[in-house]
Amino acid sequence: MAGRWLKRKGAKNPFRYRADGAVEIKLTRGKVAIVDAGDLETMGCQRWYVVAPFSPRSYARTRIASSGKTRQKVISLAHFLLKAPKGLIVIYMNSQGLDCRRCNLRLGNRTNACQKARKRPKTSSRFKGVSWRQHQGKWVSYITADGRRKHLGCFAGERDAGAAYDEAALKHFGPFARLNFPQEAV
């Protein structure tokens, strides 16, 4: 159980330490962002707030005065911590936008982000990269890699087709792969 909320001199958001060594930062609308304890100082005296609080894709951001400009720059907590260069985006490995621990953040491009995308809703299968081929009465597995859709095979079982997708996703996407069976990955 986390302790009481603390306030550091100059900091705008209260924080508290977690049992695992990470720090929770109190945001608006009752939400909290999680950061590594070493990043607490880096965050400076910015006021962090939540964006899209009722969505599973909520994240923390702040406004920073741009050098020599009158307008402020809006930046997400993850981009702020990783100092993401232009053209790269931050990918949340566990898909939790408020989990900004460095073990959860990776820099990548749009292709990497698509590889980490969730299964599309309202499809014939429970698994990503799998669909039912009615005229054959089998499950077909496929993956899109290097801009091309690759057929992985037809399977009698939906789970077998999902496992074939996982094998190909690990081969093509490495740590950016979203797997159907992450607990079975070696």
Image (cartoon, rainbow, N blue to C red):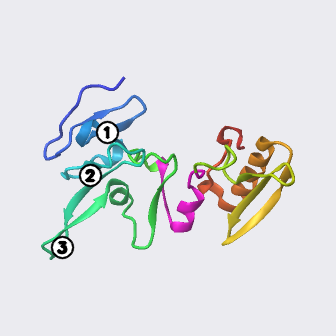
Task: Give the left or right position of residue 160, taking residue 126 as reference.
Answer: right
Residue designated by label 3: 67
Where is residue 170, by image quadrant?
Answer: bottom right
Q: Is residue 55 magenta?
A: no
Sequence-wise first label, 1 or 3: 1
Instruction: Identify the residue under disc 2.
Output: 43
Q: CA distance from mark 1 to mark 2?
A: 14 Å
Pinpoint residue 47: horizontal percent, then vertical percent: 19, 50
**Going 29% across and 61% down the picture, which residue do you hit?**
75
Q: Are marks 1 and 3 in contact (CB under 8 Å)?
A: no
Label 3: few (<14), some or many (≥20) within 10 Å?
few
Range covered by the magenta-colored residues:
103-120
In percent of the image, x 18 and y 37: which residue is there? Answer: 7
Query: Relative to residue 100, is residue 137 drawn left or right?
Result: right
- Image location (x, y in percent) of residue 118: 57, 51
x%, y% of residue 94?
A: 51, 46
- The residue type indicated by label 3 comes to Ser
Q: In x, y percent, where is residue 159?
A: 77, 41
What residue sits right under mark 1 in the picture?
32
Q: Residue furthest top?
A: 1
150 or 46: which is nearer to us? 150
